[in-house]
Image (spheres, rainbow, N blue to C red):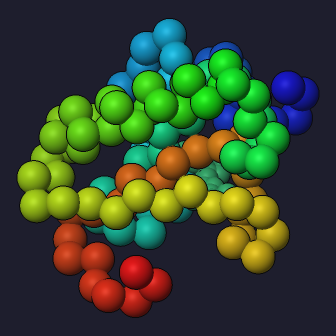
Amino acid sequence: MENCIFCKIIAGEIPSNKVYEDEDMLAFRDINPQAKVHVLVVPKSHFATLAEMSEAQSELVRKCLVKIPAIAASLGLADGYRLIVNQGKDAGQTVHHLHIHILGGQNMGEKML
Ligand code: 5GP
Ligand code: ZN
């Protein structure tokens, strides 16, 4: 997808601090971390929201979810972590390529879940 920053990161056109990659997904550190550990897990297929997701893309998301515990363990998040998947304008989604935020490395508190 042209002009999608995450597609460019997946393609290696924009550098990223990768923490995990396979044929289905890329995980890299957020450029503007909102917690001590803040990683984005991105399926290697362009779609913006769950509402736009095809069946094949849902399989990639399933694989991301299955892999996240191992990614979190590799990041040292033994005491837990928070996942956030922003959907659209009211959620403040700024990159319109579905991504799962992993936030942790600290007590995340009780604000907003
Ligand atoms: P959203 O608000 O769409 O759920 O989250 C998008 C996230 O992507 C933000 O946390 C933002 O900091 C991150 N981000 C935007 N551009 C880049 C980039 O070029 N590199 C990296 N590593 N993260 C980015
Ligand atoms: Zn994209």
Along the viewing direction, whichever of 2 and 51 lies nearer the viewer: 51
Of all residues, the one furthest to the right in this rendering is 2
Quarter of the rendering containing residue 57? top right
Residue at point 41%, 58% (across, down): 83
Along the viewing direction, whichever of 91 and 57 lies nearer the viewer: 57
The number of discs equals 0
Q: Give the x, y percent position of residue 65.
A: 40, 37
Along the viewing direction, whichever of 95 and 66 lies nearer the viewer: 66
Quarter of the rendering containing residue 98? top right
Q: Give the x, y percent position of residue 59.
A: 56, 24
- Quarter of the image with the N terminus is top right
Residue at point 75%, 28% (across, down): 54
Of all residues, the one furthest to the bottom in this rendering is 111
Along the viewing direction, whichever of 78 and 66 lies nearer the viewer: 66
With respect to residue 18, does 98 lie above or below?
below
Of all residues, the one furthest to the front in this rendering is 55
With respect to residue 4, does 99 lie above or below?
below
- Looking at the image, residue 80 sits to the left or right of residue 5; the answer is left
Residue at point 17%, 52% (across, down): 77
- Looking at the image, residue 27 sits to the left or right of residue 8; the answer is left
Residue 17 visible to an observer of this rendering: no
Residue at point 31%, 57% (across, down): 37
